[in-house]
Amino acid sequence: MRGGQAGDSLYALEAKGLSAILGGQQVLGIPSLQVYPNEVLMVIGPNGSGKTTLLLCLALLLKPATGTIAYKGIPVSDSKQVLQLRRRLAVVFQESLLLNSTVWDNITLGLRLRGVRGDEARDRAQKWLGRFSIAPLAKRQAKTLSGGEAKRVSLARAFALQPEVLFLDEPFNALDSPTRQALLEDFEGVLRETKLTTVMVTHDRNEALVLADRVAVLMKGTIHQLGTPQEVFGTPVDEDVASFVGAGNVLPGVVSEQSHGIVSVDVNGRYLQAVSDLPVGTKVAVYLHYEDITLSVVAAKATQSSARDQLRGRIVKVFPLGSQLKVTLDCGLALASVITKRSWEELGLRIGDEVMAYFKASAVRLIPKH
Amino acid sequence: MDLIVQGVVEAFKLLIRGDPEVLKITLLSLGVSLCATAVSLFIGITLGTVIGLTRFQGRRILVSLINTGMGAPPVVVGLIVSVFLWRNGPLGILHLMYTPWAMVIAQFLISLPIITGFTVASIQQVDPKLRLQVLALGASHWQLLWLLVRDTRLPLLAAVMAGFGSIISEVGASMMVGGNITDQTRVLTTAIVMENSKGNFGLAMALGIILMILVYLVNMALTMIQQRSKPR
């Protein structure tokens, strides 16, 4: 299988043994990464995790210290090949990076560099100017555009190239919230329609949830988890991923009892039941989704429920998340839950109230610490 | 006071009459300096772009040398060129001493560091990510060079102006390597020096006015290009 058969690979793009060194420090170490044709792969991770470096390596804009990158099974070797391959890719950066000329000139520049001229170039430019709703801006000087307009130009410029793989490095980062939302919607529509093979880097979990077919979580230069958004956000493989994807509580604990697949975990003196085979004494990170915790008022007398776990606590903080509220409790340990605004009102809750938090033992995920 | 009035009057007489001698001197001045600027532009912008874009050992030393060169006294440049072109010098065999070509060489060497230095400075102001973006659009290395130069055209115009301005008005080197020979290497600046020392203030002033007009015209042309390409 070494080298792969020319043009006959299962993968649009494959990287092997990839490492990169910046300023004498290794910032990337990826044994293998595959991108399937027509998928949207989102690489998420905190700042400084090596996301941009990975993207630049894959887009052939940065030479990795070690490793091979293969497009459609053909490994990239000499620099002539790099230029030819770059002309089959497109990259959108965080900044719009337009040249000092008209919008039209910016959109057609890449096409000219790739030898697409005349009617073909004009048609493509017009199509994508229209698709990103910026046709009236064609004659404007790029430097006079607003941030959102410039970003639309840089996206249209990339799509007009009809690349085999599209790379995006936090493209919506620098935009204000309404602009960002509008553009994200347009962009999602375009991605869905073109089915373009896409690798996008972001630290925004929502973008990943909305756009991704698969999500790779990059931390300190290594991929901790790669899977569907449901897998990554629902069942993080380790504590780092869990705390980054941030849809749940991550609490440190120790397994204190074990009987028939149900364990009791000591979390700061409170005991939680969980479904697990881990032996007594194992140090774990307890991962508990906000959505899996239900709240009820203490006075309402604990009704019978299949939830094995219940904790009594006091509401210390409420934070709005769209139509929902993130409610943080002090139960001897900090525990957050997400409930709808409606149930908050129906329960008549206020900050300082005592409540019971319920959750099923099967909702408590234990991630052993190494 | 009389002298000045006389000088100005004579200057305008010469200008209006279209004195052939004055015309010849003016054309040679312009020819030599434009030629030197053109060569400097080509080499200086290429060199400056490459230095501005790449990182290599000794880069800082090179850049500081270029910056020093930007302020090099033309007389010293003239001296060095003389030593090389002198009949017994290393390049004496070319018989270039006291020809317009010698002046072109000297003026080229004076303007090269100026244009290179300006180019390095303006290319370094380009966002390094723009470079990546242009490469990602599919540019070869030469296309990248050209596109970045095109993108920084405004600061680069300043380089052209400074380069041309420094040599059209330069006198020391032209005198040393050209020799101010009538009909051969006499340019505006060397002629002004000579006429001044002979006491022909009117002619000297006429030449001075022409020189000023030339510098003004060139700068005006460049400024107009600059203003036109400014976004509005």
Image: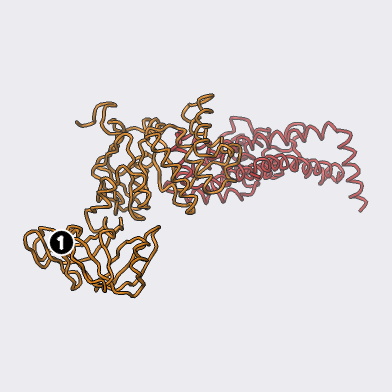
The residue lying toward the viewer, choosing from A306 and B78, is: A306
- Apparent colour of chain B: red
Q: Is residue B84 above or below residue A347?
A: above
Give the quadrant of the N terminus of chain B: bottom right
Disc 1 residue type (three-letter)? Ala
- Position in image of residue A16 (x %, y %): 25, 40
Q: Residue at x 27, y 55 (%)?
A: A241
Q: Judge from the rendering whether residue B74 lies leftward or rightward of residue B5; answer left or right.
A: left
Q: Residue beneath label 1, please?
A: A274
For image coordinates 25% across by 59% down, the residue present is A292
Which image quadrant for residue A134?
Answer: top right
Instruction: Report x, y in % for residue A194.
Output: 40, 34
The quadrant where residue B138 appears:
top left
- Indicate the position of residue A41 as horizontal and vertical percent values: 32, 42
Horizontal and vertical percent for residue A223?
26, 49
Left/right of residue B12 with respect to residue A271 in the rendered view: right
Q: Which chain is orange?
A: A
